[in-house]
Structure formats: structure tokens, C-alpha cells
Amino acid sequence: MKKTGYAQTAHQTGRIAKMRLRQMKIAEATDCSMEELEQMKEELARTISKYINIGNHDIHLYLKRGKKATILVSTVTLPSSLGDEAPEIMKRSS
Amino acid sequence: MSEVIVVTSGKGGVGKTTVCANIGSGLALLGNKVVLIDTDIGLRNLDVVMGLENRIIYNLVDVVEGSCRIKQALIKDKRCEGLFLLPSAQTKDKSAVTPEQMKKLTDTLRDEFDFILLDCPAGIEQGFRNAIAGAEHAVVVTTPEVSSIRDADRVIGLLEAAGITKKELLINRIRPELVRRGDMMSLEDIGEILEIPMIGAFTDHEEIVIAGNSGEPVAGRDDSLGQAFMEVCRRLMGEEIPVTIPEDKKHLFGRIRSILNRK
Ligand SMILES: Nc1ncnc2c1ncn2[C@@H]1O[C@H](COP(=O)(O)OP(=O)(O)O)[C@@H](O)[C@H]1O
Ligand SMILES: [Mg+2]
């Protein structure tokens, strides 16, 4: 049989579902593709890393739906030497 | 004061018609005068779920076109005081009715009924626009699956744009054993994604399939499922009751048995 490229991970898939839904919501609200969003995070990381020692994975995006507007929020997780634990807000980011 | 509530979802097959039938009969059991309107023109279902398919003479399109009076088309459910159904047309298509006509119809019905419940078709086209036209309150039904939740999110956005500010979430067909082992999103997860208050949560339940066979709603029955529908109705009437998931006892026993067998 041919090999597929699917990961076939059948473990805790509920979390994967939630992460994908978050990404879809951001992509739909911003009218950006997933690729563009990744690119945006990389560019943000590049800029910020000039000042703070962070990497690509330290930038997170999430949406906040307000009454009048939807807000795209970007958070930066600081290296542990600078900050304490990830703030509450990080639990909601993708 | 009367209230017009649309039961909608985006995706088909998630339980809109089932929910509509059960909250309709539940609200009537609580003493309200209720009319259910099947807005799925061309694919009528609600009459069958309610067990009233043999009593249809006139339908929604007849009423809107003026071929009969509203009273003539309303079917009174003899098993449940205060419950009426306005069935859909089987042989017309969605364009037979406009949102303006639906708005006029629901406004007329307000004089007579406490609750006007609209069973919305799947999709976000004309059938959806018809169903939401006269409503000020929406119950959004979703299952815990990615595609269904995504559609619900889309529909919530459209309801918002249409000025329907009162929106509540009903999560259907939960499989507690999958949630427990992390392979299905929990109520909290779904609530966090969709960001609207929850009005009810139901497991995948055998009794719903069985009741569907004989055309009898389960609301009001003396079991956890029947009572859970009554709680949704009480919440619709303004009571504050925390949302719990009624477990399917047969599944529960099955699970205990399978655990015992494993030993
Ligand atoms: N909680 C549930 N448990 C088991 N079966 C269900 C449940 N909810 C709905 N169903 C079944 O799923 C099918 C689709 O439901 P229906 O209410 O017609 O969905 P919709 O109106 O959204 O298309 C029906 O056969 C119904 O009996
Ligand atoms: Mg239906």
C-alpha cells in the first residue's frame, strides 16, 4: 500500500480540533491565509528579537471579539530570565 | 409578551429539527402557547419528528401566498395543549417565500402566541434569511466537531450582522467517553471558541432516535433527557439554571460493564 503523508496521530485530538478552529477564526477575521499569518508572526518575531531575546515560537496571535470591533492581539512570551510564568492571556492564544 | 426564536446551525444534521420539536413541546408543557414553523421549504421534516405528518392540509407557502388563512394551516397537537405546527411545503422551493413575508407572518403570530419557534434549514442562503427575518432570539445548535463549530461561528457572525443580539448555544451529540479521553472538545472548549452563552448540552442519545421513530418529542419525560429539555425551556423563559449534560444511562451501564469485563 502507498504511504500517506497524514500524521495519523490519534491522541488527544480534541486539542488539535480547538487549535485548528482558533486558527480558522483568525484567518477568516483577518482575511489572511494561514501562511500569511505564519509569515506575520515571523516578521514580528524578527523585529522584536532585535530588542528582546525571543524566537518565532514566542509570538502568539488571538482574537478578541468586542461589541463594536474584533481585535487581533499579538502576545510575546518573554524568556524565563525576564518574566515569570506565561500570563493567563497565553492560555487563550494559538 | 411574545418571543420569536430561530433554531439554526449552518450545518445540516446537527439536531435543529429535534431541538425545535422538543423545546416547542416543552414550552407548551410549561403552559405557553407555542407555534412551530418549519421553514425548510422543499424538505419538510418537523411534521414527521412531531408525528403530525398525516394531518397536513395547508402549509407555509399557502399562508404566505394567501391561499388560506393562518388558522386553517395551523395543526393543533392534540397530545399537548397549546402546541401548534405550521408545516412547510414539500413541492415548492426556497424562493417561494421572502424574508419580508416571513417577518410579516411572525409579527401577525405574535398576537396569538407566547413563543414562535422557527426551524431553520441548513445553509446560509435564502432559507436561512427567511428563517431569521422575524426573529429576535437565536438558538445556535452545534455538535462538538470542527466543521459544525466552524459553521456555527459563521452563522453567529451573520446573526450579529442581522442585528440578532440574543444568541445562545446548544451543543448536541456529545460523546462523554471521547471528551474524557481528550478526543472530543469539551463544553468549555466550544464555549471559548464560539463566545456566546450556553443554553443546553445533550449527549448522543438512543432515546432521541427511538422517539423519532414514533414521532414523539421526549421533552417532559421523567428521565434525565426529558428533564434536560425542560431545563432548556425554563432557561428560555428566563430562569437561571446551570447547564449539565444528561448522560445516556444505557451508555453509562455499557461503560461500567466494559470496565468490569476488562478486569
Ligand atoms: N442527541 C442526539 N442523539 C442521537 N441522535 C440524534 C441526536 N440529535 C439528533 N439526532 C438524530 O440526528 C438526525 C438529524 O437530526 P435533525 O434534528 O433532523 O438535524 P437537522 O434538523 O439539524 O438537520 C436525526 O435522525 C435525529 O434523530
Ligand atoms: Mg432539520
Image (spheres, rainbow, N blue to C red):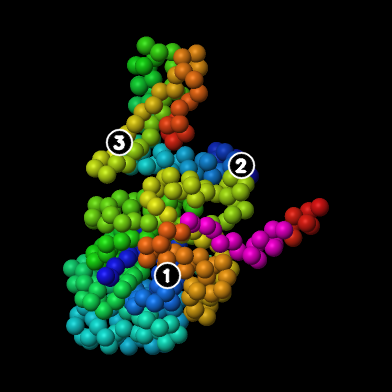
Instruction: Identify the secondary structure beneath mark 2.
Output: loop
- Cβ(mark 3) to ligand 1 < 8 Å? no
**Residue B135 placement (x, y as % from top left):** 27, 64
The amino acid beneath tag 1 is Ile
Give the labeled residue for mark 1: B23
Which corner quadrant holds the C terminus of chain A? Answer: top left
Give the labeled residue for mark 3: A71
| Residue at the outermost front position | B239
Of the residues tagged 2 and 1, which is closer to the observer?
A: 1
| Relative height, residue A91 to residue B162 (above, below) | above
| Relative height, residue A44 to residue B188 (above, below) | above
Marks 3/2: CA–CA distance: 32 Å
Q: Which mark is residue B85?
A: none
Q: Chain of mark 2?
A: A
Of the residues tagged 3 and 2, which is closer to the observer?
A: 3
Q: Few, some or many C-alpha atoms within 10 Å of disc 1 (few <14, some 14-19, many ≥20)?
A: many
Residue A88: tell me if it is visible: yes
| Relative height, residue B230 to residue A91 (above, below) | below
Residue range in magenta is B242-256
Give the labeled residue for mark 2: A11
Residue B53: tell me if it is visible: no
Q: Residue at x 36, y 76 (%)?
A: B32
Which corner quadrant holds the N terminus of chain A? Answer: top right
Instruction: Identify the secondary structure beneath mark 3.
Output: strand
Q: In the depicted view, which residue is nearer to us: B31 or A50?
A: B31
The amino acid beneath tag 2 is His
Q: Residue at x 35, y 37 (%)?
A: A63
